[in-house]
Amino acid sequence: MKNVQKLTLFALLGASLAFAQADTSKRLITIQGGPRGDLRNGPLTYSGNPVKATVSTLNIQASQAVLAAPQGTPLIEAKGKRTANFTGNVQVERGRLSASGSALAYSEATGQGVLSGNPSATFVPEDKEDGDKVNINASQMSLDVDNNISTSTGNVRLTNGNQTGRADKLIFDEDKELAQMTGSPSLTRAAKANQKELTITGQEVRALTKTKTLYVSGGVKLVQGTQTTTGNAVYYDDKKNVAYVVGNAVSVDSKSKVTVRAPASGYLEQRTDLGRVRALNSAYKIPVEQFKLSGEK
């Protein structure tokens, strides 16, 4: 019995090791072309018009690339620990996402490629009927090769049709077409027809870019014309022009001096196309499950 248990344990350890190795192998980078430098110890410098490289589902182009190993480790023995630094008109493609910047630093150990130098990215919808392109600008942008998620930081600006989001940090999930904004986030929907500009702020903004729906939580505020509505959280459907505000929800019109307050068991419904707010005496449950990032519990 003990021998069987040992064999089972070894089999499980072997399977775990094989999985880890397979997972790590996705981070290994391949750079095309004939490099200059010490082939054994590195670093190796690649130049071309352009230099091309691949890692997992990322395709990279740049004017130059330098492949290096940790100090004291020969390059030929450093797979999984190497770094690749790309400079000059860096272009990155992954599925429907394309990004660019002046430099990209990639680490096989972390599986992260960090774009700098006024990086920007564009995510296109699968079909034209699926909505608008998503454009992202930031001070720095990190692409993860283990999943289809990017993280942008510093003066982040996201545009999606008539919606513009701003924040200190943005996580964009390409699989779910979901943006999570934190760090003084705000989202503004431009004025259209008879609708006045709408701005929503809170501690966290989550936006499904395909359906144009938002979930904002933490001291939320909606400002449209002379109307200001506050609460604990809001679900906003841009296509239906309606916002549902829950948790101590109050709306005040500074011009008419009218105040609408949700009952303790209810919520406020704000029609952004009609400029109308009404209190409803029933519970409203925001569909928060829709706004979870891939792998988020």
Image (cartoon, helix red, strand yellow):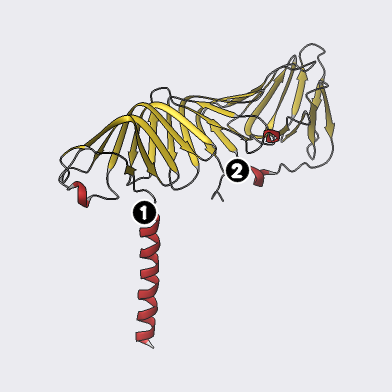
Q: Residue at x 44, y 48 (%)?
A: 146
Among the 4 quarters of the image, the one containing residue 231 = top right
Q: Is residue 148 left or right of residue 54?
A: right
The type of residue carrying mark 1 is: Thr
Where residue 45 appears, as percent x and y from the top left, is: 23, 34
Q: Mark 1 points at which residue?
A: 24
Which quarter shows the N terminus?
A: bottom left
Where residue 168 appears, as percent x and y from the top left, is: 49, 27
The type of residue carrying mark 2 is: Lys
Q: Is mark 1 on a helix, strand or loop?
A: helix
Q: Is residue 176 left or right of residue 145?
A: right
Q: In this view, does 110 lie to the left or right of 178?
A: left
Q: Which residue is drawn at 75% across and 31% down?
A: 239
Q: Mark 2 points at which residue?
A: 176
Among the 4 quarters of the image, the one containing residue 47 = top left
Instruction: Name the residue nearer the viewer: 10 or 43.
Output: 43
Where residue 262 appears, as percent x and y from the top left, is: 79, 32
